[in-house]
Structure formats: C-alpha cells, structure tokens
Image: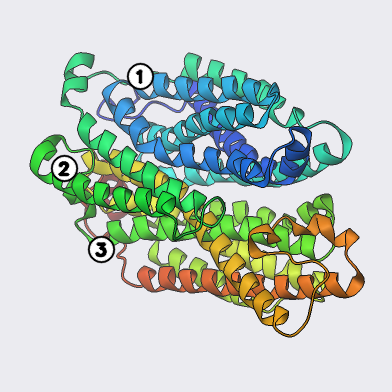
Amino acid sequence: MDHTASDASSPYPVKDFRFRVVILCLCVCCFIASLDTIILSSTLPAIAASLQATTTDAYWCSASFLFAQSVVQLIYAVVARALNRRTCMLAALGFFGFASILCATARNIQWLIAARTIQGVGTGGTNALVQLILTDIAPLAERPKYTGLVTLFSALGLVIGGLCGAAIVQHTTWPLVFWINLPICVPTMVGFAWCLDAPPRQSSVWTAIKKTDWGGGIIVTGSLAGILFALNSGNAVYPWTSGRILSPLICGGVGLLGFVAYERFVAKENAILPGRLFSNVTAVSAYIMALLHSIILWTATYYFFLYLTFCSHSYLSAAILMLPATLTFPPSAAIAGHIIGRTLKYQLANIIGFAFLVGGLSGLANLNEFSSVGLQIGLLFIVGTGFGIPFISKVFMAQTAVAEDDQYMATAIVSTVTSVGECFGVAISSTTFQNRWDALLEKELKQTVLSVVIKGSDAERSTVLFGTLDKETASFYRHIAMQSFQTVWIVMGSLAGVALILSLFIRDPKTKEATPTESSVEAIILDKEKA
C-alpha cells in the first residue's frame, strides 16, 4: 500500500489495489480462524477414536488451542508495536500453517495437542493483528464498515466449518480438517508480504525494544495463563476444589494485582496497559461487554449444536439447523457497522442487540426434546441477529473512548478479552451444565435404579451411547439433558441482561463538535457542519 495519500496530511494509505488486497487478506484471516475454531468440534470424536485418546486428551485438543490463542494476544500487540505489523502477521500465519501440517500428520494424541497449541499461538496472533492493522490503515469513522466486512468472513467460517467438519467425518478422513488450511494460509501470507507496508518508524528498532514494557507483558501473560489453565481444566480434568486448579487460579489472580501495581509504579509512562485506558465508563463497558458477548456467543454456538444432537439429529443435520443463526449474524453485523460508521452512534445498537439476545436466550430456555423445528429456527434468527448487531460496536466504543495514541492498545484489550471470553464460556457453561445434570441424576438415583449411570462429566459425550440404551433410560437422560440446557440458557440470558444494563450507561461520541479522540471523526463533523 502506498502511504502517500492524496491528502498529504492523511496518515492513512490510498485505497488502491494493494489496499483492497490487504482488506481481503484480513477477511481471510478471520475466515480461517473461525473455521479452525469450530471445525474440530464435529470431528473430535473421530480423531479421538483414531488416535486412541482418552476423554481428557480429547478435551485438551480443543482447550489447548483456546488457551494458547487467548494468552498470546497482548504479547503480539507489544511486539507489533516494537517491530511492525507485517512481520508479526507473517509470523502468526507461519505458526498457523506449520502447526496445521503437524496436526495433519499427528501419530498420537500428545503430538496433536502440542500441534494444536502452536496453532493457537498463530490464531491468537491473527485475531489480534486484524483489528490492529485496520486501526493503522482506516480512519476511525470507516472502521465499522471494514470490521463488518471481516465479520462476514468470520461468520462464513462458522457456517462452512460446521458443515465441512460434519461432512469430513462422514465421508473422508480427519487429517483433511487440517490440510485444507494450507491452500488458504499460503496465498494470504503472499498477499500480506506484497501489499502490507510497514509504516515509517519514529525511532530505531532497538529504541522501541528498550522502551517496551516487557516486564508487564510477561507478568500479565503468566497471570492469564494460570487463570485460563484453571478455567479450562476445572471439572473437565480436575475437580474445582483440587489444588491443581486452585493454585494456578489464585496465583493468576495475585499476578494480575501485581501487574496493576507494576504498571503504575514501575513501568509508568511505558506501561502496555496504562490506567487511562480504563478511565471512563464507556471504555470499561466496552471491555466488559466484549467479554460477555464472547462468553455468550461461544456457549450458544457449542451448546445449541449439542442440544440438537440430544434431539437425535446427526452432526450434519445439526450443522444445517444452525444455519439460521450463522446466516443472520453477518448481515446484522454489517448493517449495524454501516449505520455506526455513518452516525458515529453505538449506544442504540448495543441496547437493541443485547435486548434481542435476552429475548432469544429466554426463548431457548423453554425448548425441550419435543420442540418444533420451526420454533428452533425462529429463535436462532433472533439470537443470531442479537449477536450481530453489537458485534462491531465493541471495538468502535473502545477506540472512541480513549485518546488517539491509545486506540492501538484499547483494540488489543478488546481482542484479548474476546478470546478470553471463549475460555470463560467453556468453563461457565460446562460447569453449569454438569452441575445441573449431576443434581438431577442424584435426585433420580434416590428413587430408582438405572441400568447405566452417566455422570455430568461424561454427559456431553453421552449421545453416542444412546443407541445402546433401552428406550426408557435413553428418554430419562434426554430429559435431564434438556433441563440442563435450560439452566445454561438462563445463565447466558442473565449475562446478556448485564450487558444490556451496561449499554444504558455508555455514551456516544459528541456529534455537534469535534471530539479529541480522532482526527477522522473531526473531519466528518466539520464536513457535516459546512453542508
């Protein structure tokens, strides 16, 4: 891209062919990240059987990916600021492509878990850098439009990932799940190498490295690693009361407190997360709402798919029935992004979006194994729209709520908490589901004797056993599964309600006078006043 814009005062590149290639490559990064996140859920049983994996090993195939993806994002942001975005993006895609080869050629489950961890490191980098690069190349008022575009590709990855994974399981072998990444990854690397220019440096690389808050980066990464390990392992690998869960959880919490103190008293002006990033209600609300949105999104994506399998749908049939949500998500996000970019207002979008979510999740809480397909589809339309409308505004909110020089790290925070929300969603929803299941099972065991006892920790994989159970036992477990799903939806609906309340307290940027946060907003406002 040519950074010599038609307007010499503009820091943004002209929108030439190379600019469009970069936008396309960013879209592909979002597509492949969401594809790889969702595709394993439908292929994991086949992979586990092929590699003779235990339940715990199979769990870590997914958990290690989410864990690594969440932990590395702030580190990528720190390194990208010290070096440049292009180098970091190529490194992230390189990690991802290399790990895909390792995954496809895995000969045992330990090999696959290690490869998935490396793949998570690559995906975490692309997730963080997509929004950071958009911050570099597009004015603030235009970012919702481009964010809407990359969201379309992200949602497309969810759609194709679910269908593709189910089809691969039924018609071919599981390594294809990972081989298909390479024809997508390699051209994207070429596109970035050719078209994404590094902006001119204000100082030497060595000076930038010396001024970087490496200590803070190490502390916050280690603390997040401890907390996310505990969240990923709790109830799935070890009991929540186990020292192996409590120790990293407590140490991670103490580490975050130490990080706050380190940033304030040691790093000071070089802090990667200075206190001013959290100095107003709108910025803090943006971070919290991004976290809540991610928790609810990934819980709904996984647990509604699981609900459909408990309703006796095949993996492919369940993936097709999920389409109403995944197909309404991108257009609602794109339309909301266009309106936000034109009006510079996001409060109403958040209120409407989270109101849709509260209503849709409340409806899901009333579903059971006998609910009609029409009702399921109707509720998915509502939920998908609710996810899409506020999706773009979280980044825009954070950027307009801070000074222009701080928009980079505000964007990194939103990206990080979004990935952390995936892990939180897994922890909260699985614990809720399993605890409700165990409580219902314990109550039943006091009254009768079951031919097969399936505990909550095995519930999510129990659908494969239903064909071997007698009709009465299968009906009982299907019924307690429905009640467990209802509890999950109630919890998620409550979190959506919290986000809805937060949206009442955020403030739109001023439109009658120039705001101090971004020169592009000021220019748009002045143009409107002249007109």
- The x and y percentages for residue 175 are 74, 28
Res 281 label: 3
Element marked by disc 1 = loop
What amino acid type is highlighted by mark number 1?
Answer: Ala
Dot in front, 3 or 1: 3
- The x and y percentages for residue 277 are 23, 49
Q: Image quadrant of residue 100?
A: top right
- The x and y percentages for residue 465 are 83, 58
Q: Image quadrant of residue 74?
A: top left
Q: Is residue 331 left or right of residue 252?
A: right
- The x and y percentages for residue 374 are 80, 71
Q: Image quadrant of residue 79?
A: top left
Task: Say if residue 439 shows up in the picture.
Answer: yes
Density class for disc 3 (Cα within 10 Å; few <14, some 14-19, many ≥20) is few
Q: Is disc 2 in contact with disc 3, using a CB cutoff of under 8 Å? A: no
Residue at label 2?
A: 263
What amino acid type is highlighted by mark number 3?
Answer: Val
What amino acid type is highlighted by mark number 2?
Answer: Glu
**Image quadrant containing the N terminus:** top left
Q: Is residue 477 above or below residue 41?
A: below
Looking at the image, which residue is at 64% across and 74% down? 486
Along the line of sight, the residue nearer the viewer: 82 or 65: 65
Element marked by disc 2 = helix
Residue at label 1?
A: 198
Looking at the image, which residue is at 42% across and 33% down? 129
Closer to the chain start, of discs 3 and 1, is 1
Q: Is residue 368 left or right of residue 350?
A: right
